[in-house]
Image (cartoon, grey):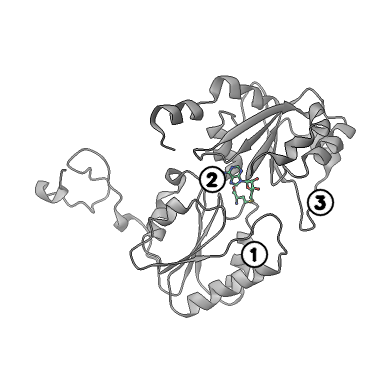
Amino acid sequence: MNDTRDTGRDENARGTPAADGFARLSHADFPDFAPGSVWLVGAGPGAPGLLTLLGFHGLSHADIVVYDALVNEDILNWKRDGAVLEFAGKRGGKPSAKQQDISLRLVELARQNKRVLRLKGGDPLTFGRGGEECETLASVGIPFRIVPGITSGVGGLAYAGIPTTHRDTNHSVLFLTGHDATGDIPQGVDWKNVASASPVVVMYMAVRNLPKIARTLLGFGRDPDEPVAVVSNATLPHQSIHTTTLGQIPDAEDIVKLPTPALVVLGRVVDFHDRLGWYAKAMRENAVG
Ligand code: SAH
């Protein structure tokens, strides 16, 4: 193994390659993680390599990591020795009262002068309630930083070989959640407009309500022949992809039993999966995400 100190180079200098020619992560390039502050970090969709460098830096300096159910636990191995891990998981539309408890816990830990890293799946502000946690922190004057992550609706699709946009198919994309606090399809979504607004719709938390969503969109005139993909456990070794058409979904009772977490993609971009799906092959060849 090469050691940069042998070369006489300053391994912390920005842009200095290590002796083996590979760049090294220099913590000097990243902001200080001040005690008494909270970093709200997106872990990405699952594969550990999809955590950002800034997220990695935060993780390796935090005193305590408060993490969610969808965070791949392999990422937690990058915490520094002695840092505490605290699970704050919520899954599948549990009552939202707990959200306030989590926010208050972050306040409590920051007031103990800890470096608090709040680690959430995907991007913390995308269907992740990170905005609510920041509101609580802001309201009591706790300093915080937001470290965006790769949202599953983008990164997960990339691992399925489905472009979110492609000039041949769509110039816009629409992200929505398929269930609200009651578990039903969200009334806050204008389904009539969704049916016509965007050629590609990416749905989070939508598998359980998929038959109802499909019936609603078909009722508002969406083409029954449009392809749909359900991408389960995206970016993880057990990723799986189920393809169908919008018109077939209302009669496909088993679709609600597909593995979760899963993304539902509606639109012609799904057809690219046949040609661009690369991950299953990559996994067969070297079994690394
Ligand atoms: N903040 C997260 C989303 C949290 S909501 C993000 O930006 O990705 C949880 C939903 O995200 C799940 O129900 C599922 O729809 C989606 N999701 C998260 N991780 C996923 C994964 N690895 N594969 C498929 N869907 C995923």
Q: Is residue 244 above or below residue 106?
A: above
| Spatial separation of the CA atoms under disc 2 and disc 1 | 20 Å
* Residue, disc 3: 184
Q: Is residue 198 left or right of residue 128?
A: right
Look at 58% across and 39% down and name the residue there: 154
Mark 3–mark 1 distance (CA, rounded to whole Å) = 21 Å
Q: CA distance from mark 3 to mark 2?
A: 24 Å
Left or right: 37 as drawn, with respect to 179 = left
Q: Is mark 2 within 8 Å of ligand 1?
A: yes
* Cβ atoms under marks 3 and 2 closer than 8 Å: no
- Residue 202 left/right relative to 82: right
Q: Earlier in the sequence, mark 2 or mark 1?
A: 2
Where is residue 256 drawn, in percent x and y? 74, 40
Q: Is residue 6 above or below residue 253?
A: below
Circle 2 — which element? loop
Circle 1 residue: 132
55 and 72: which is toward the camera = 72
The crowding category of the residue bearing disc 1, from other C-alpha atoms within 10 Å (few below 14, some 14 to 19, many at least 20), is: some
Contact, CB < 8 Å: mark 3 with mark 1? Answer: no
- The amino acid type, in three-letter code, at marker 1 is Glu
Any part of residue 164 in sight: no
Q: Report the residue that reaches farthest toward the bottom.
A: 112
Mark 3, residues whose alpha carbon is within 10 Å: few (<14), some, or many (≥20)?
A: some
Q: From the image, tell me which residue sits under label 2.
A: 45
Q: Looking at this view, is 30 or 224 the one in front? A: 224
Q: Residue at x 78, y 22 (%)?
A: 225
Q: Amino acid at mark 2?
A: Pro
In this rendering, which labeled residue sits more in front, label 3 or label 1? 3
Which amino acid type is marked by label 3? Asp
